[in-house]
Amino acid sequence: MNGLRTVNDVEGSLRKGERLLIAGNPWAARGWFDVAYRRARERSDATAMARAALGLGGLWVHEHRTVADAAVVRERQSDALRRVHQGSALALRLRIRMTAEDEYGAGAHEMTLAMVEEARLAGDAVALAEALSLAHHCLMGPEHALTRLELAQELIGTASRTSRRGDLLMGLLLYTVDLFLTAHPHAERRLAELRELLTREDHLAVASVVDALAVMLCVRSGSFARAEEMATALADRAGAIGDVNATGWFGGQLGTIRWFEGRIAELVPLLEGLVNSPMLSVGNYAYYPGLAVAAASAGDRRMAAAMLARLRGRDMADVPRSASWMMTMYSAVEASALLEDRDTAAQAYALLAPYSHLPVVASLGVSCLGSAHHSLGVASLTTGDVDRAVKHLRAAVHSNLAVGHLPAVALARARLGQALHMRQDIGASQEASLAAQEAALLGMALPDLGQGSAVAPGAPYEVVHSNGLGVPAGERLVCRRRGRRWAFELAGRLALADHTVGMGYLAVLIANPGREILATDLAAGPGPESPSDPAASTQPVLDEVAKREFKRRLTRLEAEIDELEALNELERAAKARTERDWLITELAAAAGLGGRTRDFPGADERARIAVGKAIRRALKRIADADPIIGAHLRAAVHTGLRCSYRPE
């Protein structure tokens, strides 16, 4: 009688666990499989042990993140495999699961793909469905985009033979994710199809990813507050059911939101806690450079450099091509830009360049930072290849517009403005202006990109001076670049100020005490001088062709605004009005007396005005940080057609 009760208990526990697994709840199913395995082992029931050991693996790969938990499950699967008939379907399914777990941890996939082929030859639809799903998870690197799509499509077809609803949902989910990972225009159509299927019957695991995709799309639209609310709610739900992805997903989503808000420095404490969390996937290296970006933005260059060094190890090329690899490279590029680390930027560029056509998406679509062209452009700026940077950043603006990633558009456009300014391109101010307008509409704080700095970042500049401000004669004024900030040290006093163009001009003057430097040279920045052009002083602000194009666009915008307002599409109408107002302002600014096109002032005069204003703004920031240092600089710095720093 006791033996019969044990058999019934084992079978009952297995069925409960399998029903929960089919419903997409591997976390609740785990307890039933644990009970079933232990009781089946007591009876030496190899078949029941194998079913329970398979169930303990869950739906995804690498569901058991701690070493202890993973070791227990691995031992149970190995034990069950030794006992079960080696030619059985259960043995095949166990070998598929164990092979995928091994290769995922090692960043490999060859043997898992071989198991897919073995399952095809065996003709077992359930084994094939599981092999296809697990192989897909082992191929999340950007180089496998086409193979993943083929696996997902085959899984959708195989689901018709397994009669397991979860196989169809998993296949459609993976296919939808693949479309997002390749910026396919039909990605959101497949997401709508998936949502429709979930309304008929829920599947917790698939629904969690769908909710994460919704957060990603909300960030793309620029609705940061709403996206944060959704991410927090998702993390709470996932944490409540024991989903191990909750920690990594929420950190990535919040980091993306704060990055676009311009508040990434706030996350240093959170990221310090997450970077060594045992709940992160074995292939997740993104939090090292992510913390480096946050630390550098907060002024902690030491921590930033340490995190970047931890990522690089012996060679950054050794970082596994996991689902977080693209985000890892994005963060590495941004950190290297903040730290002026040309070597890291150059290596990241070489690694990322083959995937320039892809968006930077983390995991199964939980977060998106925009086009990879953006990272390639920033890396090019860091290494000094401005022409290449312009090419990539133009492509980034276009690609981000195509997927509707509005914050990424604004950030890429701001970087494009920086690159064009460094190249002395006339389009720089227009791109910067558009970026500022786009950012304002979204509530973003664009980074101070320090356009036009004529000083090598990070270099210290010292000068001995005397002054009449209570500072002993002979004290040194020390000016150093610290990431996005400048430090001015004088007689034990310290003034920290955010980087601006004017700070770069001041650094050059301080490095050359007593020397007069032309404002045009300061504005031009480092590099070979351009040949003078006598016609430049009478160049029209807008030529006739540009004026005609502006007016044609203005006419189209007026009609578009009327149409959008009639359709009650108020948000798009507001954006069109913003562009219209900007065009009107540009046309008005270009008009002289009697409506004639106004000419640019001479190059020397333009530089005098621009450099003078930039330096005065920088001096005010320094004075706000330390009045004594500010007063000294105001007395010692002279601006005009020729600028100088005279501390005597």
Image: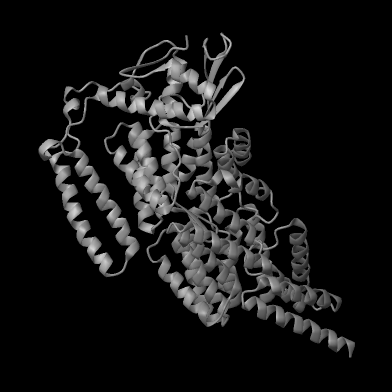
Horizontally, is 247 left or right of 376 in the view? right
Horizontally, is 103 left or right of 325 in the view? right
Foreground residue among 38 and 575 = 575
Q: Is residue 119 visible?
A: no
Image spot of residue 471 (x, y percent): 57, 14
Image spot of residue 44 (x, y percent): 83, 77
Image spot of residue 327 (x, y percent): 52, 50
Is residue 339 positioned above or below 22 on the image? above
Is residue 6 positioned above or below 592 on the image? below
Determine the residue positioned at 51% across, 50% down.
326
Q: Is residue 240 visible?
A: yes
Horizontally, is 40 left or right of 236 in the view? right
Image spot of residue 552 (x, y percent): 16, 52
Q: In the rendered image, which quarter contains the N terminus?
A: bottom right
Is residue 310 positioned above or below 32 on the image? above
Is residue 292 positioned above or below 211 on the image? above
User: In which quadrant of the rendered view does residue 113 lie?
Assistant: bottom right
Could you tell me how many numbered marks the image carries? 0
- Protein image colouring: one colour
User: In which quadrant of the rendered view does residue 599 lie?
Assistant: top left
User: In which quadrant of the rendered view does residue 449 lie?
Assistant: top left
Foreground residue among 70 and 450 = 450
Horizontally, is 1 left or right of 392 in the view? right
Foreground residue among 117 and 427 = 427
Q: Residue furthest right?
A: 2
